[in-house]
Image (cartoon, helix red, strand yellow):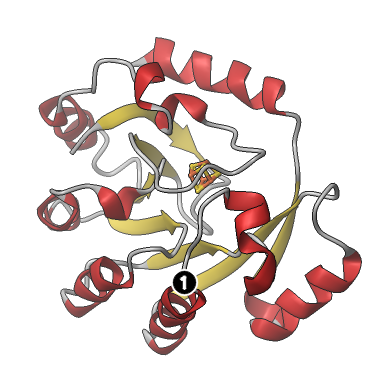
Amino acid sequence: MKIGGLIKFTLIDFPGRPAAVIFTQGCNFRCRYCHNPELVYPHLFTEPVPQEEIFSFLQRRQGTLEGVVISGGEPTLQEGLIPFTADIKKMGYAVKLDTNGARPDVLAELLDKKLLDYIAMDLKAPLDKYSLITSVDTPPEILMKSMQLIRQSGVAYEFRTTYDKEVLTDADIQALEKLTDKEHYRVQECLPVAKEKAALKVLHKEI
Ligand code: SF4
Protein backbone atom coordinates (compact mmCIF):
# COMPACT_ATOMS: atom_id res chain seq x y z
CA MET A 1 0.00 0.00 0.00
CA LYS A 2 1.27 3.44 -0.90
CA ILE A 3 -0.22 5.82 1.63
CA GLY A 4 0.20 9.54 1.11
CA GLY A 5 -1.59 10.92 4.12
CA LEU A 6 -3.85 10.49 7.10
CA ILE A 7 -6.55 12.60 8.69
CA LYS A 8 -6.66 11.45 12.27
CA PHE A 9 -10.20 12.44 13.12
CA THR A 10 -13.29 13.41 11.18
CA LEU A 11 -16.99 13.50 11.91
CA ILE A 12 -18.02 14.27 8.33
CA ASP A 13 -16.40 11.68 6.07
CA PHE A 14 -18.02 8.48 7.36
CA PRO A 15 -21.77 8.93 7.97
CA GLY A 16 -22.62 8.25 11.60
CA ARG A 17 -19.12 7.34 12.74
CA PRO A 18 -16.10 9.19 14.10
CA ALA A 19 -13.36 8.12 11.73
CA ALA A 20 -9.86 8.48 10.39
CA VAL A 21 -9.18 8.90 6.67
CA ILE A 22 -6.32 7.17 4.88
CA PHE A 23 -5.29 8.61 1.50
CA THR A 24 -3.67 6.27 -1.01
CA GLN A 25 -1.29 7.44 -3.71
CA GLY A 26 -2.07 6.99 -7.38
CA CYS A 27 -5.10 7.46 -9.58
CA ASN A 28 -6.12 6.36 -13.06
CA PHE A 29 -8.22 9.49 -13.63
CA ARG A 30 -7.06 13.04 -14.16
CA CYS A 31 -10.10 15.02 -13.11
CA ARG A 32 -9.95 18.64 -14.16
CA TYR A 33 -10.90 19.83 -10.66
CA CYS A 34 -8.88 17.27 -8.70
CA HIS A 35 -8.34 18.48 -5.15
CA ASN A 36 -5.49 16.12 -4.36
CA PRO A 37 -2.85 16.33 -7.10
CA GLU A 38 -0.27 15.16 -4.54
CA LEU A 39 -2.08 11.83 -4.56
CA VAL A 40 -2.49 11.62 -8.34
CA TYR A 41 0.68 12.79 -10.08
CA PRO A 42 3.67 10.57 -9.27
CA HIS A 43 6.18 13.44 -9.40
CA LEU A 44 4.26 15.09 -6.54
CA PHE A 45 4.14 12.01 -4.30
CA THR A 46 5.75 12.35 -0.90
CA GLU A 47 7.52 9.46 0.83
CA PRO A 48 4.73 6.97 1.61
CA VAL A 49 3.66 6.64 5.23
CA PRO A 50 4.72 3.21 6.52
CA GLN A 51 1.79 0.87 7.08
CA GLU A 52 3.07 0.08 10.57
CA GLU A 53 2.58 3.74 11.51
CA ILE A 54 -1.02 3.58 10.35
CA PHE A 55 -1.72 0.39 12.31
CA SER A 56 0.02 1.68 15.39
CA PHE A 57 -2.13 4.84 15.22
CA LEU A 58 -5.30 2.77 14.74
CA GLN A 59 -4.39 0.58 17.69
CA ARG A 60 -4.05 3.66 19.91
CA ARG A 61 -7.43 4.97 18.77
CA GLN A 62 -9.39 1.77 19.33
CA GLY A 63 -12.43 2.68 21.39
CA THR A 64 -12.29 6.33 20.27
CA LEU A 65 -12.64 5.99 16.52
CA GLU A 66 -15.25 3.71 15.02
CA GLY A 67 -14.47 3.88 11.35
CA VAL A 68 -11.69 4.13 8.79
CA VAL A 69 -12.20 5.74 5.39
CA ILE A 70 -9.90 4.48 2.65
CA SER A 71 -9.71 7.23 0.07
CA GLY A 72 -7.32 8.52 -2.53
CA GLY A 73 -6.19 8.86 -5.22
CA GLU A 74 -7.96 5.67 -6.15
CA PRO A 75 -7.63 2.95 -3.49
CA THR A 76 -8.64 0.04 -5.72
CA LEU A 77 -5.40 0.46 -7.69
CA GLN A 78 -3.37 -0.56 -4.65
CA GLU A 79 -1.88 -4.06 -4.77
CA GLY A 80 -2.31 -4.72 -1.07
CA LEU A 81 -5.77 -3.25 -0.58
CA ILE A 82 -7.57 -6.50 0.27
CA PRO A 83 -5.27 -7.68 3.10
CA PHE A 84 -4.85 -4.09 4.32
CA THR A 85 -8.62 -3.67 4.60
CA ALA A 86 -8.99 -7.09 6.21
CA ASP A 87 -6.43 -6.11 8.88
CA ILE A 88 -8.34 -2.91 9.64
CA LYS A 89 -11.60 -4.87 9.94
CA LYS A 90 -9.91 -7.35 12.29
CA MET A 91 -9.17 -4.43 14.61
CA GLY A 92 -12.90 -3.86 14.90
CA TYR A 93 -13.21 -0.80 12.67
CA ALA A 94 -15.98 -0.23 10.17
CA VAL A 95 -14.51 0.56 6.74
CA LYS A 96 -15.73 3.05 4.16
CA LEU A 97 -14.28 2.97 0.65
CA ASP A 98 -14.15 6.07 -1.53
CA THR A 99 -13.78 4.99 -5.15
CA ASN A 100 -14.08 6.26 -8.70
CA GLY A 101 -15.59 2.91 -9.70
CA ALA A 102 -12.98 2.02 -12.30
CA ARG A 103 -12.05 -1.37 -10.76
CA PRO A 104 -15.25 -3.40 -10.30
CA ASP A 105 -13.15 -6.58 -9.96
CA VAL A 106 -11.50 -5.24 -6.80
CA LEU A 107 -14.79 -3.92 -5.51
CA ALA A 108 -16.37 -7.35 -6.01
CA GLU A 109 -13.58 -9.02 -4.03
CA LEU A 110 -13.89 -6.54 -1.16
CA LEU A 111 -17.62 -7.15 -1.08
CA ASP A 112 -17.29 -10.94 -1.32
CA LYS A 113 -14.97 -10.90 1.67
CA LYS A 114 -17.40 -8.62 3.55
CA LEU A 115 -14.72 -6.01 4.15
CA LEU A 116 -16.81 -2.91 3.52
CA ASP A 117 -19.43 -1.13 5.61
CA TYR A 118 -19.97 1.89 3.39
CA ILE A 119 -19.11 2.71 -0.21
CA ALA A 120 -19.02 6.16 -1.81
CA MET A 121 -18.58 6.13 -5.57
CA ASP A 122 -18.02 9.23 -7.66
CA LEU A 123 -20.26 9.72 -10.64
CA LYS A 124 -18.24 12.25 -12.52
CA ALA A 125 -20.71 12.98 -15.31
CA PRO A 126 -23.32 11.37 -17.53
CA LEU A 127 -21.55 8.44 -19.17
CA ASP A 128 -21.16 10.14 -22.55
CA LYS A 129 -19.45 13.13 -20.93
CA TYR A 130 -17.20 11.26 -18.53
CA SER A 131 -13.88 11.93 -20.25
CA LEU A 132 -14.58 15.68 -20.27
CA ILE A 133 -14.08 15.53 -16.51
CA THR A 134 -11.61 12.66 -16.08
CA SER A 135 -9.43 13.23 -19.21
CA VAL A 136 -9.29 9.46 -19.77
CA ASP A 137 -11.55 7.07 -21.64
CA THR A 138 -13.37 4.69 -19.31
CA PRO A 139 -15.70 2.11 -20.85
CA PRO A 140 -19.19 2.94 -19.54
CA GLU A 141 -19.84 -0.76 -18.83
CA ILE A 142 -17.09 -0.71 -16.21
CA LEU A 143 -18.75 2.14 -14.34
CA MET A 144 -22.17 0.54 -14.71
CA LYS A 145 -20.77 -2.73 -13.33
CA SER A 146 -19.45 -0.96 -10.24
CA MET A 147 -22.76 0.79 -9.73
CA GLN A 148 -24.63 -2.48 -10.01
CA LEU A 149 -22.31 -4.23 -7.54
CA ILE A 150 -22.76 -1.41 -5.06
CA ARG A 151 -26.53 -1.31 -5.38
CA GLN A 152 -26.86 -5.06 -4.95
CA SER A 153 -24.31 -5.36 -2.15
CA GLY A 154 -26.57 -4.72 0.81
CA VAL A 155 -23.87 -2.36 2.09
CA ALA A 156 -24.70 1.31 2.78
CA TYR A 157 -23.68 3.49 -0.13
CA GLU A 158 -23.84 6.80 -1.89
CA PHE A 159 -23.09 8.09 -5.35
CA ARG A 160 -21.84 11.62 -5.55
CA THR A 161 -21.09 14.18 -8.19
CA THR A 162 -18.89 17.23 -8.00
CA TYR A 163 -20.87 19.81 -9.91
CA ASP A 164 -18.31 21.37 -12.22
CA LYS A 165 -20.44 24.01 -13.85
CA GLU A 166 -17.93 24.59 -16.64
CA VAL A 167 -18.73 21.10 -17.97
CA LEU A 168 -21.98 19.91 -16.40
CA THR A 169 -25.45 21.36 -16.70
CA ASP A 170 -28.53 21.10 -14.51
CA ALA A 171 -29.90 18.62 -17.07
CA ASP A 172 -26.78 16.45 -16.57
CA ILE A 173 -27.33 16.41 -12.82
CA GLN A 174 -30.96 15.44 -13.34
CA ALA A 175 -29.86 12.63 -15.67
CA LEU A 176 -27.41 11.36 -13.05
CA GLU A 177 -30.08 11.48 -10.41
CA LYS A 178 -32.18 9.20 -12.61
CA LEU A 179 -29.23 6.86 -13.08
CA THR A 180 -29.12 6.42 -9.30
CA ASP A 181 -31.91 7.36 -6.93
CA LYS A 182 -32.48 10.43 -4.82
CA GLU A 183 -31.92 8.70 -1.51
CA HIS A 184 -28.40 7.58 -2.43
CA TYR A 185 -27.26 10.53 -4.51
CA ARG A 186 -25.41 13.61 -3.41
CA VAL A 187 -24.18 16.61 -5.36
CA GLN A 188 -21.24 18.50 -3.97
CA GLU A 189 -19.94 21.91 -4.74
CA CYS A 190 -16.84 22.19 -6.91
CA LEU A 191 -14.44 23.89 -4.50
CA PRO A 192 -11.55 25.99 -5.70
CA VAL A 193 -8.48 23.80 -5.96
CA ALA A 194 -6.22 26.20 -4.07
CA LYS A 195 -8.35 25.94 -0.92
CA GLU A 196 -8.20 22.14 -0.95
CA LYS A 197 -4.46 22.12 -1.62
CA ALA A 198 -3.94 24.16 1.52
CA ALA A 199 -5.95 21.59 3.50
CA LEU A 200 -3.85 18.74 2.15
CA LYS A 201 -0.63 20.45 3.18
CA VAL A 202 -1.89 20.51 6.77
CA LEU A 203 -2.66 16.83 6.43
CA HIS A 204 0.91 16.00 5.38
CA LYS A 205 2.34 18.00 8.24
CA GLU A 206 0.28 16.09 10.76
CA ILE A 207 1.71 12.65 9.97
S1 SF4 B 1 -10.71 10.29 -9.25
FE1 SF4 B 1 -10.49 11.62 -7.46
S2 SF4 B 1 -8.29 11.52 -6.95
FE2 SF4 B 1 -8.52 10.71 -9.04
S3 SF4 B 1 -8.11 12.49 -10.35
FE3 SF4 B 1 -10.33 12.35 -10.01
S4 SF4 B 1 -10.75 13.71 -8.26
FE4 SF4 B 1 -8.53 13.28 -8.29
Q: Quadrant of the N terminus?
A: top left
The three-letter code of the residue at mark 1 reads Pro
In the displayed structure, does residue 188 sit left or right of residue 5?
Answer: right
Q: Quadrant of residue 94?
A: bottom left
Q: Nearer the viewer, residue 194 or 166?
A: 166
Q: Nearer the viewer, residue 102 or 194?
A: 102
**Residue 202 place in picture, x, y as percent:** 51, 14
Residue furthest to the right in view is 170
In the displayed structure, does residue 112 sit left or right of residue 168?
Answer: left
**Residue 58 place in picture, x, y as percent:** 22, 36
**Residue 104 place in picture, x, y as percent:** 33, 72
For mark 1, what is the residue?
139
In the displayed structure, does residue 207 sit left or right of residue 29?
Answer: left
Q: Quadrant of residue 83?
A: bottom left
In the displayed structure, does residue 51 sit left or right of residue 10?
Answer: left
Residue furthest to the top in view is 205
Which residue is drawn at the image coordinates 40% and 18% (left, top)? 44
Helix, strand or loop at label 1? It is loop
Which residue is drawn at the image coordinates 59% and 44% (left, top)? 31
Residue 190 to residue 85: above or below: above
Residue 191 to residue 145: above or below: above
